Amino acid sequence: MAGVNFADQKGIVALSMRKLGEVLGVEAMSLYNHVANKEELLDGMVNCVFSEIELPSSADGWKLAMRQRAISTRHALSRHPWAITLMQSRVKSGPATLRHHDAVIGTLRDAGFSIAMTAHAFALIDSFIYGFAQQEASLPFQAGEVTVEVAEMFVRQMSPEEYPRLTEFAVEHVLKSDYDFGLEFDFGLDLILDGLERVCVSN
């Protein structure tokens, strides 16, 4: 969709019907033959992003299905960081969005989650995914890549005497050549899924 491509390249703040029309080589009024207004355009864009996310399936077992769905969601949000704050905020949902939510709920319910536990699990997993995606998008470096400039900036800001633990953390962890912030996603996700499994089994 043109709106998705525009937001990917220029950001969601820059998006307007007029500017999108310019990119497409048409008058803004022509766009209203396809969407009623900008809100409907945003609804369609969010639906497009949801269509890129792998749907969970009960056949895979709920933990694997939720894990794959979480990873797929994170990848989609990394491709479209502008969508992070929009995915859960739309009042009107498109078919891909509805299919996605129905599949998540269905996978959890088929696994024996009660309605209440399904709500808890859905909210907890999504809070982690979207929160992590937001944090990852705001980092001063790409996941898996700590540049020399960023590393030197960290070191310059810290006095080992004043901030001993922060210095230790930076030198012994963040500034290691194999440091990858993205690995924290797998750790946190598995922790959440293991916790949900323990709660459900105990009930």
Image (spheres, rainbow, N blue to C red):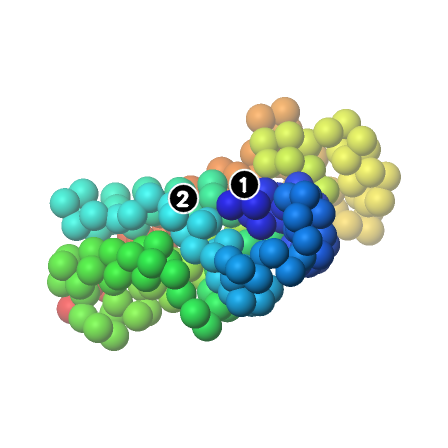
* Placement of the C terminus among the 4 image quadrants: bottom left
Q: Is residue 188 visible?
A: no
Q: In the picture shown, does residue 93 fall above or below 47?
A: below
The residue pinned by badge 1 equals 79
Q: Is residue 149 visible?
A: yes
Label 1 neighbourhood size at 10 Å, few (<14), some (14-19), many (20+)? few
Q: CA distance from mark 2 to mark 1?
A: 10 Å
Residue 160 x/y as whole percent: 80, 43
Side (left or right) of 46 relative to 106: right
The residue pinned by badge 2 equals 52
Residue that appears at 17% across and 50% down: 58
Residue 88 x/y as whole percent: 47, 65
Residue 159 x/y as whole percent: 84, 45
Which residue extends farthest top? 177
Q: Amino acid at mark 1?
A: Arg
What count of labels does the image hold?
A: 2
Q: In the picture shown, does residue 115 fall above or below 112?
A: below
Q: In the picture shown, does residue 135 fall above or below 23?
A: below
Local SS, label 2: loop
Contact between labelled residues 1 and 2, with CB atoms less than 8 Å apart: yes
